[in-house]
Image (cartoon, grey):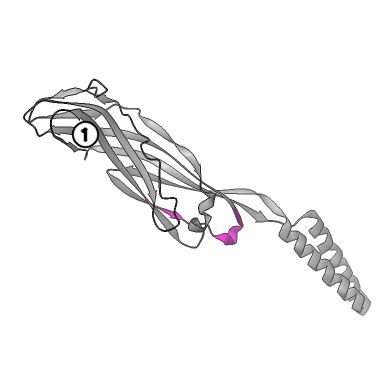
Amino acid sequence: MKYTKTLIALAFAVALGAEARAAGPLVYLAQTNSFSVNPTATLNWNQFDSNLGTLTGITFEASSGLVGSFTVINSSSSDMKARNSTAELIFNFLGTGSPGEVFSDILAPISTSPNSGTTGTNISGNSSQLFTIAAGQTVGLPLVDWFSYQSYFTGIGAVASSASLAVNVTSTGGLYTLDTSATTANGSAILTYIYQVPEPSAASLLIFGLGGLVAMRCVRRKS
């Protein structure tokens, strides 16, 4: 009887060890945040609960489109040319151990009416020019792998990221200011946790079954 109990204990120990080593298929846990940046927005992200399984990857990607208009105000008495309009969309994760700033300058250059390309658009002294952003300027932001920041994204709670938009032009002559209050970047960002959930292996299930049969046999002998 003593040896039987020992064998059962060993069987269960081996089964538990096999179960701990067995890894299930990858699970993708994605969360999406839509944003409208004018000129900033805050996005909150749930951290990964390590009780779910073993984290194996973290990815972040986004897409955005630029809409609206902006005004270049020539504050000088002399004429100027506004040219090379660009827009900058920046995601910044906050706090120690974070990925920091990503996706900068992804909306540059932008098309406008009138055209403010390399030739520029003339703006008379002490006047302003409204630039309307051409439609259809949607940009897919690159996919990044942030597994190296797993400690920052793991826990019970949330982390925050900011999204900010900045419009710029270069000019020849004159002093100018920009009114970008009518400029908006609309889009969505996706943070995905990739993890594995341990599952019983075939060997561990077999050993559990054999251990159960032995235990049942012992009970029958006692009765």
Residue 223 visible? The answer is no
Q: Residues within 10 Å of mark 1 (few under 14, many from 20)?
A: many
Q: As displayed, is residue 190 above or below residue 129?
A: below
Q: As displayed, is residue 28 above or below residue 105?
A: below
Q: As displayed, is residue 19 above or below residue 143?
A: below
Q: Mark 1 points at which residue?
A: 70
Would you identify the image quadrant in which residue 201 lies?
bottom right
Residue at image x 57%, y 60%? 50
Q: In the image, is residue 47 part of the stretch drawn in magenta?
A: yes
Q: Position of residue 65 (x, y in %)?
A: 35, 34
Nearest the eye: 214 or 192: 192
Q: Which residue lies furthest to the front in this view?
A: 173
Q: State which region is magenta.
A: 43-55
Residue 151 visible? The answer is yes
Nearest the eye: 213 or 200: 200
Q: Position of residue 67 (x, y in %)?
A: 29, 33
**Type of the residue with mark 1:** Phe
Q: Position of residue 70 (x, y in %)?
A: 21, 34
Residue at image x 13%, y 30%? 174
- Quarter occupied by the N terminus: bottom right
Left or right, 20 with respect to 122, comes to: right
Q: As displayed, is residue 122 above or below residue 187?
A: above
Q: Position of residue 206 (x, y in %)?
A: 83, 58
Q: Which residue lies furthest to the top in this view?
A: 119
How many callouts does the rendering have?
Answer: 1
Residue at image x 54%, y 60%? 49
Q: In the image, is residue 155 part of the stretch drawn in magenta?
A: no
Left or right, 86 with respect to 2, comes to: left
- Quarter occupied by the C terminus: bottom right
Element type at marker 1? strand
